[in-house]
Image: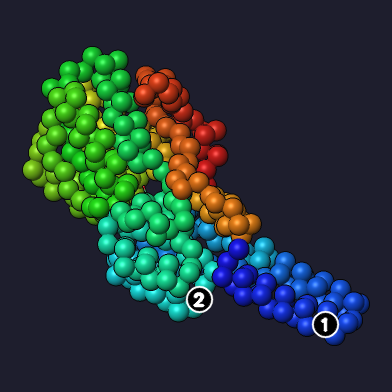
């Protein structure tokens, strides 16, 4: 039950009691029914601090929230776009507190620096739900978190690459990788970069360079152009999301080089994350992106389930990971195994493309 429910509950209790004291049973019945109707029609106001609009994944994520929290279901969703700036997100949360919303949903740009504003939300008794990336703050400052296992995504990409190289008899010391990183300090960047670093350490691949690409197509292209000027032996590009991959592919093709999985023949292989659009599936089908680890953006229904649990006075799970698939251009690696779990690889076909928008 939210603070507002408590207030309304108290009001109705006082109202019913005074009507009861007045000795009018019939009226008491009428007020109680009206009150029930009012409660069932109560609008739930949600302030959503979205971190930005940097990628296709982000657009799908915002859309999922909009499609879920509609007025005909009794919600009012207020979205504030942080434009990739934590200061904007902090301002948005303070605005939500002033507006006295029922719930604050935060998709944080980076992990650190949230304690003060989350304490302010707690003082105002507004429950906070974290989505997508995590916050490095005391767990008591938010109700729960819903999102992806970014470390696992990184490990999946690395294990797939390892299996692929083994199948093609490509020696580890001939692998020259560059990493276009996501926004530094974002959980998605931390997990995916760490996955790669573990792989480099374990298999002895050459990591030529790593630079931030901010999860955007423009920056992905710019970073790749610089890498191509600096190194003439790149054969794998590890892009920490699809939009960076689209930019990197443009840069590679403009330089006269070819993207693709045939490293031995001089291709530059592109590995990516997200796989949420038909456009990505098309890139995989064409072997422009050879492998992509899926990252599920459809958090709207999950956040709604949490809110409904809280409305019913229940305690949601503190951390919920979403399930995610992995995709490849071909069936060289049919599945990968990590910590005893088998992850089948979806080979992208025209039919797979039809599952996406
Ligand atoms: O936090 C999720 C990541 O953020 C997605 O992989 C990326 O596309 C987005 O910008």
**What residue appears at the point 23 percent right and 14 percent down from the top-left corner?**
169
Identify the element where label 2 is drawn: loop
- For marks 1 and 2, give the CA distance: 34 Å
Q: Quadrant of the N terminus?
A: bottom right
Q: Nearer the viewer, residue 266 or 38?
A: 38
| Secondary structure beneath label 1 | helix
Residue under pointer 2: 100
Query: In the orientation shown, which residue stands out farthest toward the bottom?
Result: 22
Q: Tell me: 317 left or right of 294.
A: right
Q: Nearer the viewer, residue 346 or 18?
A: 18
10 Å crowding of disc 1: few (<14), some (14-19), many (20+): few
318 horizontally vs 337: left or right: right
Q: Where is residue 242 shown, x and y percent of the image?
A: 35, 45
Q: Nearer the viewer, mark 1 or mark 2?
A: 1
Return the residue nearer the eye: 264 or 28.
28
In the depicted structure, whether residue 251 falls above or below residue 195: below
Question: How many discs appear?
Answer: 2
Q: Is residue 337 visible?
A: yes
The residue that appears at 89% across and 81% down in the rendered structure is 24
Circles 1 and 2 in contact, beta carbons < 8 Å? no
- Residue situated in front as seen by the camera: 146 or 225: 146
**Residue 8 x/y as whole percent:** 66, 75
**Residue corresponding to mark 1:** 21
Residue at image point 17% right, 48% down: 211
Q: Tell me where residue 296 appears, x and y as whole percent.
A: 46, 44
């Amino acid at each position: 039950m939210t603070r507002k429910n408590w207030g309304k509950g108290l009001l109705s209790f006082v109202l019913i009691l005074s009507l009861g004291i007045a000795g009018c049973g019939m009226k008491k019945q009428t007020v109680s029914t009206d009150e029930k109707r009012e409660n069932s029609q109560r609008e739930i106001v949600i302030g959503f601090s979205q971190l930005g609009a940097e990628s296709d994944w982000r657009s799908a994520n915002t859309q999922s929230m909009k499609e879920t929290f509609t007025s005909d279901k009794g919600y009012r969703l207020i979205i504030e776009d942080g434009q990739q700036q934590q200061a904007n997100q902090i301002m948005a949360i303070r605005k939500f507190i002033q507006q006295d919303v029922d719930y604050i949903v935060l998709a944080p740009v980076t992990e650190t620096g949230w304690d003060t504003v989350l304490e302010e939300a707690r003082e105002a008794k507004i429950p906070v739900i974290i989505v997508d990336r995590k916050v490095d703050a005391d767990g008591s400052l938010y109700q729960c978190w819903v999102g992806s296992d970014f470390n696992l995504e990184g490990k999946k990409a690395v294990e797939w690459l390892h299996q692929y190289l083994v199948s093609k008899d490509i020696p580890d010391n001939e692998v020259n990788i560059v990493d276009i990183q996501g926004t530094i300090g974002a959980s998605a960047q931390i997990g995916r970069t760490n996955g790669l670093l573990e792989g480099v350490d374990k298999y002895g691949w050459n990591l030529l360079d790593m630079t931030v690409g901010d999860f955007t197509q423009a920056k992905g292209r710019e970073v790749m152009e610089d890498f191509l000027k600096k190194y003439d032996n790149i054969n794998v590009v590890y892009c920490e999301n699809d939009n960076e991959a689209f930019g990197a592919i443009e840069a590679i093709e403009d330089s006269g080089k070819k993207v693709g999985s045939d490293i031995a023949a001089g291709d530059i292989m592109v590995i990516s994350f997200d796989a949420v659009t038909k456009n990505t599936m098309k890139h995989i089908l064409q072997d422009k992106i050879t492998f992509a680890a899926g990252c599920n953006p459809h958090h709207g229904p999950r956040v709604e389930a949490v809110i409904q649990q809280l409305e019913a006075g229940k305690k949601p799970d503190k951390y919920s990971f979403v399930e995610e698939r992995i995709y490849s251009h071909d069936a060289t690696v049919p599945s990968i195994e990590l910590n005893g779990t088998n992850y089948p690889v979806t080979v992208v076909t025209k039919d797979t493309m039809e599952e996406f928008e």
